[in-house]
Structure formats: C-alpha cells, structure tokens
Image: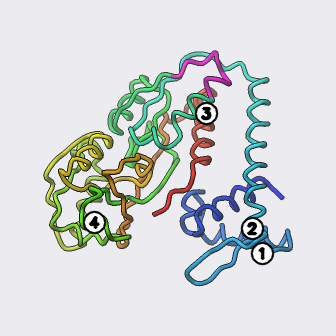
Amino acid sequence: MELRQLRYFVAVAEELHFGRAAKRLFISQPALSFDIRKFEESLGVQLFSRTNKTVALTNAGEVLLGEARRLLLQAAEAERLTVRSASGLAGRLRIGFVHSMLYRGLPDAVRRFEADYPGVEVVLSEMNTHAQVQAIQRGQIDLGYAHWGHFPPEVESAPVYAEPFVCCLPAAHPLARRRQLAVAALAAEPFILFPRDAAPHYHDLIIAQCVNAGFSPLIRHEARLWQTILSMVEFGMGIALVPRVLQQVKSDRLAFRPLKDASLESRTLALKRSGTAEPVALRFADYVRASIDALPALAG
C-alpha cells in the first residue's frame, strides 16, 4: 500500500466521481481508474461500487477512508518534522495571491509554515494575475497564486486547483428554488461581473458561455473583488457566476446553484520566475498544496 494509492483513493471517495477526482489530482481519468482498480486487486476487496452514472463507497471503502485520511496526515507530519530538523530556511518570502486563495487554504498554509519556519517572514500581497506576472518579472514577489492566463516565457506556471463556476444569486430569487440552473435561465438577469482587465480569460469565458446559451449577458455592475461581488448579490443588485469555493461564504441572503450545462472552470496556478528554484518558495508551495488537499469537498 503506497501513499499515492491512498491519495488517489481519498480523492475518488470524496468526489464520488472519477472525472472530478482526476482533475483534482491533475492526472487523466483512465490512469486514475486503472490505479484504483489495481489498488482494489492488491487489497482483494472492492472499495467502490460503480454503475454507468454513479460511484459509491462500499462498506470496506468506508472503513478505509477514515484510516487513509489518518495515514496521510501522519505521513505529512513525519515529513514536516524531518524537514524542519534538517532545514535552515530563513529570510523573507513574498507571495502574491488572488482573493479566492483566502478560501483555498492559503491562510492555513501561512500559519503552519511560519510555525515550522520561524526564521522566514511570509509577506502576502493581494494582486490580480496581470500584476503578479509583472511583479515576478521585476523581482518584487517570489511566488504567485493567480488565475489561468497566458504568461510570458520568463514566468513559469503550475496547476494548483481547479473547480467549476456556480451561479450566485439572492436567496429570495425565484431561480434559487431550483437545484441546478441552465445558463439560458439567466438570460433576463442583470449580471455583476469583474472588469475584463482584472481577468481577461475568465471574463471572455463567461461571455462565451452566455452567447452559446443564446444571449448576451446584461452586465449591470462591475466589481474587482469576489467579496464585493457577493455583497452586491446580497443586496439584490444582480446575479454572478463565481468559483464554487466561494460557497464557503456563509450568508442567509445568498444562494449558490450549480450550472448543469456549462463548461466554466476556475483554475488557480502557482507562478514563479522561470529557471529559479528558491528552496523557501518551493517549500511554501508544498504547504499550500497540503492545505488545499485538506479542504473539505464542496457539493455542486
């Protein structure tokens, strides 16, 4: 039994969907299905019951899930203690980040990293993707966490997180009574969207999804921060398409509904200057990855 097998098993068990689990792990779905099947064969038990449409844990899978989570945490702790005893990392680490990273484990990663490496001062700067690229080129930040985009050769990117967009609307809105929403159902709704220069890739994707559904969105208001957009929705000023992770924002005045016919996906990337590998930045990136992996799976 390998840690990799346990990580794969936990991802499928939490997602109950091989496609979503494969995206989360950044591997192909056939490779994940093959590895899970080989894992089951090596154990001599079936961990998942599968049909053409559903995946469910068997009794054996339920038992293993709790133990697998415990073992993965123990392995991470063992690695942490080993590295801490051997490393002399120190200095200042400058991190750029987009707002949604506050819900994707960044605060937890900073707390744990600073506790383990008190000689390193972590300095966070919120900035959009374009600003992060410029800051990396100018040597103003060591590591960035940005949205998907096209980057110059001197900026290297690596996938960190991917999730679908959902519709955020006032809780009292008639459409909030539905479990899922078709994009076409939003044709008459006023949209709250970020300006294109804030995230050109996602701005264009949202517009394209609406056009594919047969309408041009009525963009009534613009805001640069997700928190501002959510607040405007709370006040009944319109609806918004937002990354699913923002469902963690608890409000009786907000409702989040999955989009059943959209291919919108929010991707977060880690950025650094090409050809560089500062040990302190690489170590911090590991902490962010561990914090993201520990996030609870969100429905929708």
User: Measuring 26% from the left and 53% from the top, which residue is drawn there?
Assistant: 203
Nearer-N-terminus badge (2/4):
2
- Residue 213 visible in rendering: yes
| Residue at the spot of label 3 | 282
CB under 8 Å between discs 3 and 2 = no
Q: Are marks 1 and 2 in contact (CB under 8 Å)?
A: yes
Q: CA distance from mark 3 to mark 1?
A: 37 Å
In this picture the colour scheme is rainbow
Image quarter (top left, top right, bottom left or bottom right) of the N terminus: bottom right
Q: Which residue is mark 1?
A: 46
The x, y position of residue 251, in whole percent, is 36, 47
Which mark is in front, 3 or 2? 2
**The residue tagged with tag 2: helix, strand or loop?**
helix
Which one is earlier in the sequence, the residue at label 4 or at label 1?
Answer: 1
Pointer 3: residues within 10 angstroms few (<14), some, or many (20+)? some
Picture layout, residue 86 above or below residue 20: above
